[in-house]
Image (tube, helix red, strand yellow):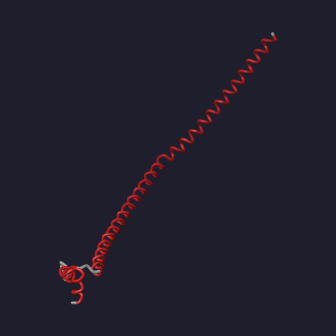
Amino acid sequence: MQLHERLEELVGVRGADILLDRPPGGWSDLVTNESLDQRFAVSEARVDRKLDALDHKIDALEARIERKFDALTANMELRFAGIDARFGDVEHRFDRFEHELLASVDRRLRAQAWMTISTIVAVGGVLVAAIRL
């Protein structure tokens, strides 16, 4: 009662009635720290569940991608092994052909060098004989 009288002095009768009356929606509509904590706990639990589900989906997706990459790697290794098996002999034959070709060129160059030297010696002999005559 004293509080009501003091409020009447400060803010008037209507103001004191409003201040001391219950809130417009009733006392149950007032927000307390406890009610806020409860709401935040419920919201956090819901967000945590959604994040856990998202983590699970991401893990499953990573596992699927890894399996696909492993299968692709195995497939490529098989194909390269097949290529090596088919063309490994070709490489050996090419190396042998290259060696034979170089040997043949070397023999021909030597023969040509001997023919050139022989021709120069013969022409030199003819010139010497012509000069002596």
Residue farthest to the top, as pictured = 133
Up-down: is 63 above or below 102?
below
Query: Which residue lies at the image location 21% right of the left edge and 90% below the top edge?
Result: 1
Residue 67 coordinates in the image, percent (x, y):
38, 61
Q: Nearer the viewer, residue 75 or 44?
A: 44
* Quarter location, residue 111: top right
**Residue lying farthest front?**
9
- The percent position of residue 127, horizontal first and vertical second, equals 76, 15
The quadrant holding residue 70 is: bottom left
The outermost residue toward the bottom is 1
Residue at 23% x, 83% y: name it.
Answer: 9
Instruction: Please give the count of numbered marks on the rendered protein.
Output: 0
Left or right of 75, for residue 22: left
Residue 23 drawn at (x, y percent): 20, 80
Front residue (pair 35, 72): 35
Residue drawn at x 31%, y 71% as measured from the top left:
47
Quarter location, residue 69? bottom left
Q: Nearer the viewer, residue 122 or 20?
A: 20
Q: Quadrant of the C terminus?
A: top right
In the rendered view, tell whether residue 30 sits above or below residue 101. below
Q: Position of residue 90 (x, y in %)?
A: 51, 43
Seen at 24% across and 81% down, the residue is 10
Q: Along the horizontal axis of the image, is 95 left or right of 118?
A: left
